Amino acid sequence: MATVTLIGTRLAEAGTEFVYQGEASACEGCPYRDQCLNLTVGRRYRVTEVREGGSTLDCGVHDTGVTAVEVEPAPVLANVDAQSAYAGSKVALEGSCPYTGCPSHEFCEPAGAEFDTEYRIDDVLGDPPHDYCMLDRDLTLVEFAPPEDD
């Protein structure tokens, strides 16, 4: 189900994904707070539609202002233990990884997912982008289902 919110005009394009970071100090006293601060902190969202005919509103955070969009929770791509990688199963991330140059790092520490939290696997995508894991983990790339409690 889509939620109407305000985001920076530079991000306001269908298909754009972002992780909501919550309130910034510049939000204090803003008359549009209730329309902007209505998402779940740390969750990944996808813009599904830009509201036509909407005004660009001044914003203390976004230098070009904000505009109304519809967003929905977005799936998160992640590497998980290969033995647990089954569609429909629930798994947690394997843990942090110091190898930031690895082509799989963004999937081992994906934006929009937390360690020590279980996620339902929506789809098993297959081999991760790395040739070998520096931590000797046997990983499979999966898509976590978006949370349903929004």
Image: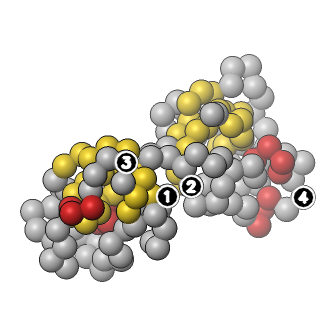
Residue 109 seen in render = no
Query: Disc 1 and disc 3: Cα gap in Å?
Result: 19 Å
Q: How many residues crowd mark 4 within 10 Å: few (<14), some (14–19), many (20+)? A: few
Mark earlier in primary sequence (1, 2): 2
Q: Position of residue 87 (x, y in %)?
A: 32, 47
Q: Are marks 4 and 3 in contact (CB under 8 Å)?
A: no
Residue occupying the point 46% across, 64% down: 118
Q: Identity of the amino acid at label 2?
A: Arg
Q: Are marks 1 and 2 in contact (CB under 8 Å)?
A: yes
Which image quarter holds the N terminus? top right
Q: Is residue 60 left or right of residue 15?
A: right
Give SS at disc 3: loop
Give SS at disc 2: loop
Residue 6, relative to residue 53: is it above or below?
Answer: below
Give SS at disc 4: loop
Residue occupying the point 27% across, 61% down: 84
Residue occupying the point 30% across, 80% down: 98
Q: Identity of the amino acid at label 3?
A: Gly
Residue to which mark 1 is pinned? 112
Mark earlier in primary sequence (2, 3): 2
| Mark in the foreground, 4 or 3 | 3
Q: Identity of the amino acid at label 4?
A: Gly
Q: Position of residue 43 (x, y in %)?
A: 56, 55
Residue to which mark 2 is pinned? 43
| Mark in the foreground, 2 or 3 | 3
Residue to which mark 3 is pinned? 88
| Mark in the foreground, 4 or 2 | 2
Could you say which is closer to the camera, residue 113 or residue 30? 113
Residue to which mark 4 is pinned? 29
Q: Position of residue 88 (x, y in %)?
A: 37, 48
Residue 80 seen in render = yes
Q: How many residues crowd mark 2 within 10 Å: few (<14), some (14–19), many (20+)? A: many
